[in-house]
């Protein structure tokens, strides 16, 4: 199926495909060029309308796909790079995977854009914000729609840039800028891996276009071929950076410095899932490299566990969510590692819904608290913010894996696959799930129950957010509730609609390595047991959280309070930032200072300045030779002739 | 006999040339110059280049030198009109010229000048008839172009000599 | 008809080389030492003539008429040059009341 990705012979399709990324780009240009000149209402309208337009077009493509015979197709826009054997077309590939990602990016993107119009309404750089958001959506669409690795890389870098711009959006605050720089630099490390992976792909398969690469790989490469392992590992390094996996995860919590809608859109729902998209897109290569998959699974699991433990003791509402995002991303990579590609994408979808919901809910809370993010200053917000509370509760239930909310289905499916692969991994996954439920309900109890712990002023200011912010919350809450039903487990339904829809994407991999896709169904009894266990674990965690933070109304210790060593270690995020600082940042800074002081000031500067001085001095002294008197010129000319003849004579 | 005549003419030429350079009065310079050309004409005759001797005599000694003399007198130049260069720069100039001379002599000393071949020697090449044939057969185009050059030179001299509209009438 | 001129038989061609070089260098020294533009001009004529003499000498010694044709053209060009050059000198004199080349030191930045 996939080896014959035909160009769409339909001009209409080409236009639709072109318009989807083009609309946000137009929005970016309008808002970017008209920043501060456009009225806020118009800027918001342009920003939202372009993304919603893209969403509608994506829907059109989605529903037209079936009419097209469920056949993937590419639309060539123009020949982008054509050097020697290297041919990179600027074209879009539309298949099941990119359609799902399109809907996710534009759908969640639209909701968050609308929310932003309310959330950012008091900001002076409203237009700039929307232009960046639109640029982000544009880049993300290039990433998911591109038909080759180079276009993916362009989008990849584009979202990285937007991430940088938006984390440092309030660029008057130095720590925010540092967070932005950190995100950018750590992403660079990953990008280097990605880039090397692309080079290796081109060298090995002679092309970077998906269809050709995968065909070549499926036909030529053996399972666990060294080159394939190298390619997949390099690509995975890229995914590590973008999707915040160990050891490159530290930028994501810091990235919460950006405005909350940004955290929701970029650092929870879409950009961080680019790594997962890339792995699923390259599923042929990964299927051919089971060793890499094992590494992916281990790193994913370690990240999930590690981040979850840190999340247990964080007091900043957004930091908790950030670590939970890292943890959930770890889950997704765990699923990829056990070759449950569809389950991973399923979790990407549901996670996008409920994590965006949670972030936007947190944004609503922060909005009501006039910018306060510390959980210790909140409490009892249930009455003041009823809609936010209910939607936040739904999101929390979803992430904790309580049926029938979305997270339950995706996480359960994911864990079932892990169970088939390895019981130990499953146990750790369950532990992570337990911690997730615990810290999310800790967050919920601390923020919405108990007494208000903030200042009097904040108490007066408490208010429910405007409709433009609550409606997106409600939409996402609905999606978080019903989103799971697109992938019902086999016990409930024979028809896993998402899995069936995505199945052609793996056709080539299935043909290349048939054994890897051997049906390995769990018995229904076992499936029920697994489900019951995971729900039970979540419920236990919730009850624990209720007893500690709901009933006893424990409030986390103040800054600087004496903590037990373990608690302190976890509270300080295992000192990873400090470790990186000491291990990498300090030596590099020292090296650069040393180089600056000795090489730059001592060697390079004198050389460069010396050239200038010699030239100046030479000019100053040679100036006298040019007296302007013809006589001296003649004299010099004669001497010159004599010299030339003399040289001729000597040589 | 002819050999002695050669040495005499050479001596005369160099003497007159030095006279041109060292004479304080421009008019004497011109006269020495005429003497130089006269001696050179003798050289041409010795070399059996009679046409050139005639041309040199008429064009150089007659036309060009008279033109020089005319201009010098026209500008009313006397001994005191020229300010002399400082001695140092004169010495420098002499040294430069001397070095050039030494270097050139040194370079030309070992030049292998092919001796004339009596078998094919033609003493008549410098005659008017012979040169005229070569000139109008092989060098017809340059010859005609030379006339264009003269025309241009004439027009140029007239243009340069003409008073410009705003120029002061000094003399 | 083929009687070789005596000077060609008795005087080596090298003597003409040295003689022309000497004449040329005298011209150069004149150009360098004098300040009167007309004298300098005459010294240039001197140099031209030294070249003419050498060309003629080679032409006669090797019985090749082309050298003498060249001398003829050099004389023609020199005549034209003198006409224009003297006109320029006269014009300069009219403007600055002098033919001293040290006044002409405008050839700098």
Image (cartoon, rainbow, N blue to C red):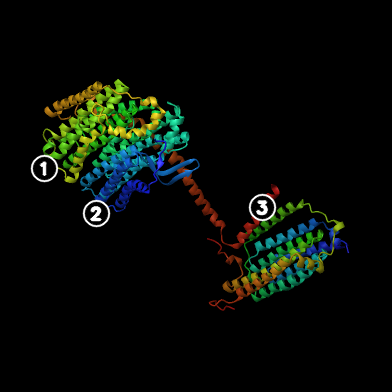
Image quadrant for the C terminus of chain B?
A: bottom right
Helix, strand or loop at disc 3?
helix
Q: Chain under label 2?
A: A
Q: Which residue is mark 3?
A: A644
Same-chain status of marks 3 and 1: yes
Q: In the image, is A556 to the left or to the right of C7?
A: left
For the residues marked 3 and 2, what is the alpha-carbon distance in whole angstroms? 77 Å
For the residues marked 2 and 1, what is the alpha-carbon distance in whole angstroms? 30 Å
- Tell me the crowding category of disc 2: few under 14, some 14 to 19, or many 20 or more residues within 10 angstroms, Cα based: few
Q: Nearer the viewer, mark 2 or mark 1?
A: 2
The circle drawn on residue A57 is none
Pick whichever of labels 2 and 1 is earlier in the sequence.
Answer: 2
Q: Nearer the viewer, residue A38 or A409?
A: A409
| Residue A395 coordinates in the image, percent (x, y) | 20, 34
Q: Chain under label 1?
A: A
Same-chain status of marks 3 and 2: yes
Q: Is residue A409 above or below residue A86?
A: above
Q: Chain under label 3?
A: A
Helix, strand or loop at disc 2?
loop
For the residues marked 3 and 1, what is the alpha-carbon distance in whole angstroms? 96 Å
Pick whichever of labels 3 and 2 is earlier in the sequence.
Answer: 2
Image quadrant for the N terminus of chain B?
A: bottom right
- Tell me the crowding category of disc 3: few under 14, some 14 to 19, or many 20 or more residues within 10 angstroms, Cα based: few
Same-chain status of marks 2 and 1: yes
Q: Which residue is mark 2?
A: A39
- Give the quadrant of residue A534: top left
The answer to whether residue A99 is visible is yes
Q: Which residue is mark 1?
A: A460
């Amino acid at each position: 199926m996939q080896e014959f990705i035909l160009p769409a012979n339909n001009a209409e399709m080409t236009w639709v495909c072109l318009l989807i990324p083009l609309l946000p780009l137009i929005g970016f240009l309008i808002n970017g060029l008209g920043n501060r000149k456009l009225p806020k209402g118009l800027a918001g309208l342009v920003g939202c309308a372009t993304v919603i337009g893209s969403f509608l077009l994506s829907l059109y493509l989605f529903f037209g796909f079936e009419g097209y015979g469920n056949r993937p197709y590419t639309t060539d826009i123009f020949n982008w790079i054509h050097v020697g054997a290297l041919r990179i077309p600027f074209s879009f590939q539309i298949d099941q995977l990119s359609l799902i990602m399109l809907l996710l990016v534009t759908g969640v993107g639209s909701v968050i854009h609308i929310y932003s119009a309310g959330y950012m309404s008091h900001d002076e750089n409203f237009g700039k914000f929307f232009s960046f958001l639109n640029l982000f959506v544009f880049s993300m669409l290039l990433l998911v729609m591109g038909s080759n690795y180079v276009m993916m890389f362009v989008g990849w870098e584009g979202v990285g840039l937007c991430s940088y711009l938006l984390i440092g959006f309030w660029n008057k605050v130095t720590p925010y800028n540092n967070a932005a720089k950190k995100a950018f630099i750590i992403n660079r490390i990953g990008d280097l891996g990605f880039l090397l992976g692309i080079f290796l792909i081109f060298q090995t398969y002679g092309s970077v276009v998906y269809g050709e690469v995968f065909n070549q790989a499926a036909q030529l490469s053996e399972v666990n071929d060294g080159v394939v392992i190298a390619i997949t590992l390099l690509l995975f390094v890229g995914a590590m950076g973008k999707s915040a996996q160990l050891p490159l995860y530290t930028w994501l919590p810091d990235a919460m410095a950006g405005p909350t809608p940004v955290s929701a859109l970029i650092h929870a729902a879409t950009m961080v899932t680019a790594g997962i998209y890339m792995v699923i897109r390259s599923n042929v290569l990964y299927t051919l490299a089971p060793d890499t998959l094992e590494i992916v699974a281990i790193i994913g699991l370690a990240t999930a566990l590690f981040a979850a433990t840190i999340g247990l003791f964080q007091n900043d509402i957004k930091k908790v969510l950030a670590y939970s995002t890292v943890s959930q991303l770890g889950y997704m990579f765990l699923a990829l590692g056990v070759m449950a590609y569809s389950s991973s994408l399923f979790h990407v979808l549901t996670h996008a819904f409920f994590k965006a919901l949670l972030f936007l809910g947190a944004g609503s809370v922060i909005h009501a608290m006039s910018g306060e993010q510390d959980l210790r200053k909140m409490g009892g917000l249930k009455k003041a913010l009823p809609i936010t509370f209910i939607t936040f509760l739904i999101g929390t239930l979803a992430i904790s894996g309580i049926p029938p909310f979305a997270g339950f289905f995706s996480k359960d499916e994911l864990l079932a696959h892990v169970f088939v692969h390895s019981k130990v991994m499953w146990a750790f996954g369950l532990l992570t799930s337990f911690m997730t439920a615990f810290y999310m309900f800790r967050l919920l109890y601390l923020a919405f129950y108990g007494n208000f712990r903030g200042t009097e002023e904040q108490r007066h200011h408490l208010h429910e957010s405007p409709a433009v912010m609550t409606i997106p919350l409600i939409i996402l809450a609905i999606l978080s509730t019903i989103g799971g039903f697109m992938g019902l487990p086999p016990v409930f339904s024979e028809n896993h609609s998402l899995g069936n829809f995505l199945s052609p994407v793996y056709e080539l991999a299935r043909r290349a390595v048939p054994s890897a896709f051997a049906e390995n169904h769990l018995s229904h009894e076992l499936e029920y047991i697994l489900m019951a266990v995971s729900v039970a674990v979540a419920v236990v965690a919730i009850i624990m959280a209720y007893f500690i933070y709901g009933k006893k109304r424990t409030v986390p210790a103040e800054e600087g309070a004496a903590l037990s060593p373990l608690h302190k270690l976890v509270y300080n995020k295992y000192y990873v930032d400090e470790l990186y600082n000491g291990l990498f940042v300090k030596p590099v800074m020292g090296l650069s200072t040393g180089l600056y002081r000795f090489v730059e000031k001592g060697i390079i500067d004198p050389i460069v300045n010396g050239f200038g001085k010699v030239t100046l001095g030479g000019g100053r002294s040679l100036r006298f030779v040019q007296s302007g008197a013809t006589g001296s010129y003649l004299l010099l000319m004669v001497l010159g002739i004599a010299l030339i003849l003399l040289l001729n004579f000597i040589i | 006999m002819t050999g002695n005549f050669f040495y005499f003419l050479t001596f005369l030429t160099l003497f007159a040339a030095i006279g041109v350079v060292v004479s304080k009065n421009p008019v004497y310079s011109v006269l020495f110059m005429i003497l130089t050309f006269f001696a050179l004409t003798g050289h041409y005759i010795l070399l059996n280049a009679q046409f050139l001797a005639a041309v040199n005599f008429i064009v150089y000694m007659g036309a060009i030198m008279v033109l020089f003399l005319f201009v010098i007198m026209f500008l009313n130049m006397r001994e005191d009109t020229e300010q002399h260069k400082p001695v140092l720069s004169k010495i420098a100039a002499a040294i430069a010229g001397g070095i050039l001379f030494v270097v050139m002599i040194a370079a030309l000393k070992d030049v292998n000048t092919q001796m004339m071949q009596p078998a094919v020697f033609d003493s008549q090449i410098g005659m008017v008839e012979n040169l005229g044939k070569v000139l109008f057969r092989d060098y017809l185009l340059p010859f005609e172009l030379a006339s264009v050059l003269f025309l241009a030179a004439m027009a140029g001299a007239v243009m340069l000599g003409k008073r410009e509209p705003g120029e002061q009438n000094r003399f | 008809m083929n009687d070789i001129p005596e000077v060609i038989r008795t005087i080596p061609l090298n003597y003409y080389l040295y003689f022309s070089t000497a004449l040329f260098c005298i011209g150069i020294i004149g150009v360098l030492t004098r300040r009167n533009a007309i004298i300098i001009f005459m010294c240039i004529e001197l140099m031209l003539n030294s070249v003419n003499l050498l060309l003629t000498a080679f032409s006669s010694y090797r019985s090749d008429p082309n050298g003498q044709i060249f001398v003829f053209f050099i004389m023609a060009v020199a005549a034209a040059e003198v006409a224009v050059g003297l006109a320029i000198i006269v014009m300069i004199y009219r403007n600055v009341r002098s033919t001293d080349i040290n006044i002409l030191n405008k050839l700098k930045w």
